[in-house]
Amino acid sequence: MANFNKVILAGNLTRDPQLSYLPSGTPACEFGMAINRKWKSQQTGEMKEEVCFVDCRSYGRPAETINQYMKKGRQLLVEGHLRYDQWEGKDGQKRSKLTVHVDNFQFLGGPPGGSAPGGGYGGERAGAPARAAENHDEAPPIEDVPQGGGEEVPF
């Protein structure tokens, strides 16, 4: 049986990126994205819209680049894979969360403070994934060892 785990999203950041460092010293950047979906209702013919909020995480030099250039409201295209994290909260309840671990990204919309013809700028390949998730009030511990047999990619 074949398996495939790939996500491509284009949307706006919902908050400023947060840069932290794993115990190994590897930079890790967490940020949220809002992805809008519009469609026409078949019953009423009216336009409908929904927003999907997604938490993302990048590592290494790409994490530093995203942290440096991206701010809340800026547009970003990310390519990555889903990661399912589980942990026990401070209240003893089991918690879980899906997070997109960024493999590649592309800035959209042009550089800050100006407009660039042709749309986006920049773009980098992200490093190997490591276990992490954020749940606005608590999160599982961040491990320094990549999960799932991932190999550390030098930057």
Image: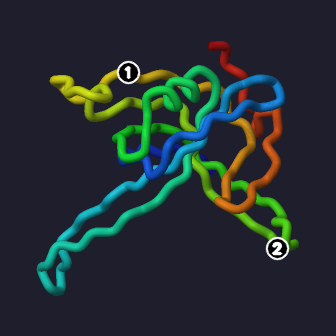
* Percent x, y of residue 11: 36, 48
In this orientation, does residue 111 appear?
Answer: yes
Q: Residue at x 43, y 47 (%)?
A: 13
Tell which of 36 and 74 is nearer to you: 74
**Residue pointed to by mark 2:** 93
Position in image of residue 95 (x %, y %): 75, 67
**Quadrant of the image containing the C terminus:** top right
For mark 1, does the 10 Å Cα neighbourhood hold few (<14), some (14 to 19), or many (20 or more) residues? few
Q: Which mark is residue 122?
A: 1
- In this rendering, the answer to whether 71 lies above or below 62 is below
Three-letter code for the amino acid on which mark 1 is drawn: Gly
Q: In terms of sequence position, does the residue under pointer 2 or pointer 1 come before the other?
A: 2
Foreground pick, 79 / 73: 73
Left/right of residue 117 with respect to residue 38 in the rendered view? left
Q: Is residue 49 left or right of residue 145?
A: left
Q: Quadrant of residue 42?
A: bottom left
| Near-viewer residue (135 or 49) | 135
Q: Position of residue 137 (x, y in %)?
A: 70, 62
Work out how far the residue at label 2 is from the one at label 1, CA to CA, in angstroms. 41 Å
As displayed, is residue 86 above or below residue 153? below
Q: Secondary structure at mark 1?
A: strand
Residue ID at (67%, 59%): 135
Residue lying farthest to the top in this orientation:
155
Residue 80 coordinates in the image, percent (x, y): 52, 39
* Residue 145 against residue 73 in the figure, above or below: above
The secondary structure type at the circle numbered 2 is loop
Q: Is residue 5 visible?
A: no
Q: Amino acid at mark 2?
A: Gln
Relative to 23, is 38 on the left or the right? left
